[in-house]
Image (cartoon, rainbow, N blue to C red):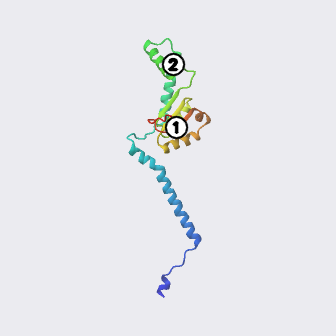
Amino acid sequence: MASSQLQSEPIPTSQSTRNNAALGMIGGAFVGILAATAPFVFIPLRSSLPYMATPGHKVEKALKFISQRTRASAASSDGKACSVDRAHRTRQYLGSNNKKLNFVDLGSGDGTAILAAASLGWNATGVELNPTLWFVSFVRRLFSSRIIRSNSRLVMGDMFESKRA
């Protein structure tokens, strides 16, 4: 009699299937999280350069300063010799006001700087080695406005390795 009391009833197959599905979803989520975070763990081991995102408002402030300096250099003609000379060199370096200014970010990370530059009308190009960060910036660019998408370009690759044919 004691042995018959210890035997349990079989679990219905529908409940077993639900348990296996829940376990599979939890395991799949765990593997997905590991796959998404692995580049952030292993790439720093390969490189001594840390990933540190620059806040977008700081990038915009710097780009606006450069744009204003370029416009001021084109407009000023009666300033001091030193400031006119510095403004002239800045204009020569950055290009004339008729052309868009170019912005290149080597190690563009999540694309914050690229998207900020593109939103201000610059031709922005970002180069990123980490495929996860490149994908994050690609998705951010994909969901940005048409103007930002047309002013920005993302390249996945190593800036130190050239592929010459």
Furthest residue in direction bottom, as rendered: 1
Q: Which amino acid does label 1 sit on?
A: Val
**Which residue is identified by label 1?**
155
* Residue depicted at 55% across the width and 32% down the height: 118
Give how far across and how far down residue 78 sits, in percent.
49, 11
Label 1 crowd (10 A; few <14 / some 14-19 / many >=20): some
Residue holding disc 2: 72
Q: Is residue 22 above or below residue 3?
A: above
Report crowding for label 2: few under 14, some 14 to 19, many 20 or more residues within 10 A (C-alpha): some
Tag 2: amino acid: Ala
- The location of residue 74, given as percent across then percent down, is 53, 17
Q: What element carries label 2?
A: helix
Nearer to us of marks 1 and 2 is 1
SS of the residue at dot 1?
A: strand
Residue at position x 55%, y 64% in the image: 21
Circle 1/circle 2 CB separation < 8 Å: no
Residue appearing at x 56%, y 39% in the figure: 141
* Tally of numbered tags: 2
Q: Residue 143 carries which label?
A: none
Q: Distance between the residues labelled 1 and 2?
A: 33 Å
Residue at 47 percent of width and 43 percent of height: 130
Residue 73 in the image, given as x and y percentages of width and height? 50, 18
Q: Nearer the viewer, residue 41 or 54?
A: 41
